[in-house]
Amino acid sequence: MVELINHGVYLLDGQQIVPQKEGLPSPDEAREQTITYQILRAHEAGNSADNKMHIRFDAMMSHDITYVGIIQTARASGLKEFPLPYAMTNCHNSLCAVGGTINEDDHIFGLSAAKKYGGIYVPANLAVIHQYAREAMAKCGNMILGSDSHTRYGSIGNMGVGEGGGELVKQLLRNTWDINPPQVVLVWLEGKPKKGIGPHDVAISLVKATFESGFVKNKVLEFAGPGVKNLPIDFRNGIDIMTTETTCLSSIWVTDEEVKHHYELHNRPQDYKELRPGKTAYYDAMIRIDLGTQESMIALPFHPSNACTIHELQEHPEEILKKIEEDGRKRYGDKVKDINLMSKIRDGKVWADQGIIAGCSGGTYDNLCEAAAILNGQSIGNDYFTMSAYPQSSPVSLATQRSGVAQTLTEAGVVLKPAFCGPCFGAGDVPGNDCLSIRHTTRNFPNREGSKPGQGQISWVALMDARSIAATAANGGRITAATDVEYEDNYAPYKYDGRIYEHRVYNGFGKAEPNYELRYGPNIKDWPHMFPMMDNMLLELAAVIHDPVTTTDELIPSGETSSYRSNPLKLSEFALSRRVPEYVGIAKRIQKEDHERRDGKTPQHVLDALKQVGASDKDTSFGSCVFANKPGDGSAREQAASCQKVLGGDANICYEYATKRYRSNCINWGIVPFTIARETPFDYVPGDMVFVPGIRKAMEEGKEEIDAQVITKDGVKPIHLYFNNLGKTEREVLLAGCLMNYYAKANKK
């Protein structure tokens, strides 16, 4: 189904793939003819003397978990007016049950900010962030920056990038997104999907093939090939949104009559243009996908890449589920006593307890139509199995009502709900303890959709396409491939009606009211003061995690914590709570001791540590540090880094950062992103300290590595740390202590 070709190829006239050969332009020259580089070069600002691209975006997107912090940071950094269209949707906090008035207070703040600074405000439950972007913001050849990791609109010709809030702040202050010129990977689509195959099947196969090896990490995926024309827009969108899970940087597709129809349907024909590679385009690698051989897939806990076909699962259920149980026991240890995924096997088949179709990947009109066709005249039953569906926007919901799709789903026992992202991150339709939920959503990371191992609770979440979820529901929860059922989809084509946006969305871009007062709720707090980098750095390890990958959901849990996203101090209390519960207490103790040091009352054990390395407390900071093998997979939420900083975190140490966006979040919050060589063992424990001498001077001089020392109870040991690939601005941000300090310093000049 998916073939990886790990060498460069040329695409001639958008049709013929050939290897490198004499007479063709050089790779560097021909890479400029990719759609990717055509768009990136059109968005460069300033010079590239540092060999980086400096990008300005056409528009931005945020949701209600992130926009308050972004605006507060930008406001503290001198923001006067939004310089580009900035849409704030309310699709994450809208149904959170914790916090009293907190969620709606955030929404009121967002509307007041849109009025004051000239923004676009989309009220709660009107649309999920990425569907609103598809319907109202994306344009062919443009670039959108979003504070959500799944910011992907390449299937309709708009490059989307998901980053932490600090990068959005930079755009609001007319700074740039600075990246190394990326490699480009050609994704060549061939064939036509069989009936019953949906976008999640293709997407899961793509993630399975690429994630673990890092085949496309920080690269741009460019989709082309004869198979593209066989995919409707919703199908393309469903694949495209999931490219985030491959850890690629962004994505872009060729455009055609189908994309043109999308813009015409949404009353924006002027926003379409043809996008094609040039005559001779070079790609650094290639992925070939045969759509015709695609099977119905299931991504099992605890990652979208942990996938197999549904037929394989039903043929070998004991073997497959036993491995997941063993993984769960390894992850949770004694925290969860009753791990019993094997109980989902009955009569030799695997049974689910819940089905969910939701969000930017699942709640499309086409997905809901096919689910309804499969469930037409059927029943999900009145036993333990339950099912919910969330159309991804009010226009999509309205279309399902007019076409009869909503009626068919409701008659079958499916509960229809308003547009909401919660089921993707544990804030809606949380499954019961030890229950297996199958979801057409974007992620199934550990500790995400309801698991609280510290309280003995665990849920199992698998990803499947909406079609196979419906087929499973029709069989009362027995996991079933949609290719194994007969059905006819005779529902009317999608018709967009944007009147609800006209009536309810506040479109204030270009109409800023500087004297308008922001409206604050009691939970919206300013960021605490953060200190600039000192000459030397003493770090105490507050958490040491040796998991292969540590997700942002483990660094800062999603779900009910979302209510506190606008309160840095309260939110920080949840940092690593589902992975290293003792972290917060340790970090707060270290922070308290650093405050004592700054007051001239340095604790004795800190003095003793500094004495061992011949250093003084007068020019040495003292902060906490997290070690993880590979941190930061998943969400773009900056809080994964900012919560560490709020608790006095000064650095991360790892072998590799899972994503650019998490590393950027660390930098923007003044957390030095150290790495160590792969062959370097890290057998240290919480309480051990790392002394980094001369870090400020090394940072100022542009150095990229430094000798440090680890202070343990058994003595002092050397360690070599790297902090390479930092741009000039990134170094200045780290020196200042965080992005806000950097801008505050600039404003004083």
Image: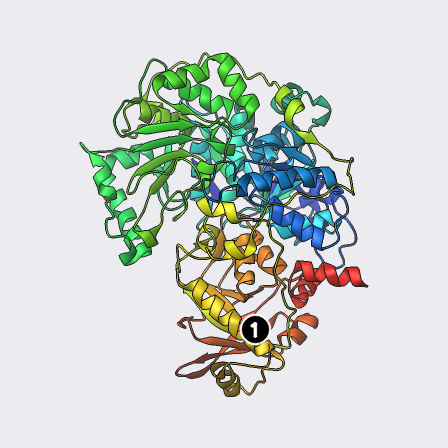
Q: Amino acid at mark 1?
A: His
Residue 39, given in percent of the width and then of the height, sits at: 70, 40
**In the image: residue 59, left or right of residue 103:** right
Q: Residues within 10 Å of mark 1 (few under 14, many from 20)?
A: some
How was the colour assigned to the protein in this rendering? rainbow
Residue 610 in view here? yes
Q: Is residue 43 above or below residue 408?
A: below
Q: Please give the residue where the numbered disc 1 appears in the rendered image.
A: 595
Q: Nearer the viewer, residue 623 or 635?
A: 623
- Residue furthest to the left: 347
Tell me which residue sits at (62%, 44%) in the image.
67
Residue 503, given in percent of the width and then of the height, sits at: 65, 22
Tell me which residue sits at (46%, 43%) in the image.
98
Q: Nearer the viewer, residue 193 or 364?
A: 364
Q: Is residue 450 above or below residue 534?
A: above
Among the 4 quarters of the image, the one containing residue 728: bottom right
